[in-house]
Amino acid sequence: MKSILFYDDAVQFGGHEVLTLAAFEAMAASGGYRLGFMHYERNRLLAERLRRIAAGSTTVSLFPIPYHTTGLVSMHAIASLSAVSGIARSMASFAPDIVLVAQGRIEACWLGLLAARRAGPELVSCLPMAHAVAVAGRALGAGLRDRINRRLYRLPDRFITFSRAVADQLEGWGCGQQVAVVPTGIDLHRLTISDKATARTRTGLPQDRYLVGIAARVDFRQKGHDLLVEAVVSRPDLFQGSAVVVVGDGHDLHALKQMVAERGVADRFLFFPWQDEMSLFYSALDLLVMPSRYEGVPLVMLEALYCGLPIVAADIDGMAEYLPKDWLFPKNDALALAATVAAVRAADVEARFASLRQRVARECSRERFGEAFTRALVVNP
């Protein structure tokens, strides 16, 4: 029986953890593998979900660790390096054939990369994004960070990613390793479409306004909430009769609320915490906006498409691979964002939904994802 050890020392639970768990759960359910999962002990939500998967299984082992990766260019990096030996020993004690390091970006979970290289088994990186540091909004020390990252890209024996755009980015970094592209998977069974009036009543949203939603971690650098505010301020005529529904939490939430107040558009914005079940909000909204500055293949995008919600998004990465061209706008262009919202709002988009929904159902189910990920990781390396 092949032994696979997953590694993810993320502090917070996000979309990449959702996908990693989906792959891990599919492999656990098959019963054909001896599995381990090494994770940061204080990531409560990840730990809880792992315990549920492991309950009653004789082939799944969990390894909570007190370490988590810090930035490579930071005061904590040297101290973090001291953890590599201990992590490597724990990895070796499990005796895996493959270590799968789940990384949002290459500088995430780099402790796992170094430890796995020291422990000796085949090393696979699951990497949904591979942008240069400056693209990800980190101008300070970008050249140094990219030089360090280029070395990290050499460590894995193979990569698994979720879009052709990322595979091309990896090639641009000079990665000669095998790259498997696995279509992202979502749980289609959890998505229940309601009629708009009922959904708005149940969520407390107004019945008489055109609702433009943004559902994401509130992080200006990546998700671009500030760009949406600028679009509303710059072209109020194009948002006439609209309200912007912000669903999400994050370190920039307070700054966002302060921004809309200072720019005089607080009455246009409605705030809701993140929802584990987003179906009601997808059903209540008229349009979803994704003004991200960099992305992989967002789960929210796939869920919204399956629910029949039009999406206006930056013309980047995985979003450009799924969305119609006239739903896309140039990255970082607030005026183009506003104009595209107005154009999609005025267009007859109903005819688009059948083919878009069929593609998501055909390519992006959780079951198909689990099978494809397992093949990429174990069956056809």
Image: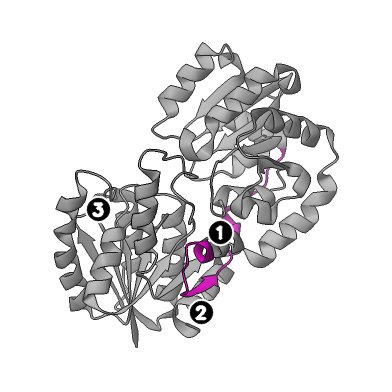
Q: Nearer the viewer, residue 132 or 42?
A: 132
| Residue under the image location 67 percent in, 52 percent down | 320
- What type is the residue that disc 2 sits on? Arg
Q: Around disc 3, counting alpha carbons within 10 Å, would you say few (fewer than 14), some (14 to 19), or many (20 or more)?
A: many
- What type is the residue that disc 1 sits on? Asp
**Residue 26 is covered by the magenta coloring:** no
Q: In the orientation shown, which residue stands out farthest toward the bottom?
A: 1
Mark closest to the chain's N terminus, 2 or 1: 1
What is the basis of the colouring in this image? Answer: one colour
Task: In the rendered view, tell whether residue 237 sits above or below residue 323.
Answer: above
Q: Which residues are magenta?
A: 170-195
108 horizontally vs 236: left or right:
left
Mark closest to the chain's N terminus, 1 or 3: 3
Task: In the rendered view, tell whether residue 112 sits above or below residue 124.
Answer: above
Secondary structure type for disc 2: helix
Task: Choose mark 2 or mark 3, whichever is in front.
Answer: 3
Q: Which quadrant would residue 41 be assigned to in this image?
A: bottom left
Secondary structure type for disc 3: loop
Q: Which quadrant would residue 66 be assigned to in this image?
A: bottom left
Residue corresponding to mark 3: 68
Residue corresponding to mark 2: 375
| Residue under the image location 39 percent in, 76 percent down | 157
Say if residue 218 shows up in the picture.
no
Task: In the rendered view, tell whether residue 270 sits above or below residue 193.
Answer: above
Q: Position of residue 359 (x, y in %)?
A: 71, 62
145 horizontally vs 63: left or right:
right
Task: In the rendered view, tell whether residue 261 sits above or below residue 158.
Answer: above
Q: Around disc 1, counting alpha carbons within 10 Å, would you say few (fewer than 14), some (14 to 19), or many (20 or more)?
A: some
Q: Nearer the viewer, residue 61 or 10?
A: 10
- What type is the residue that disc 3 sits on? His
142 horizontally vs 120: left or right:
right
Residue corresponding to mark 1: 187
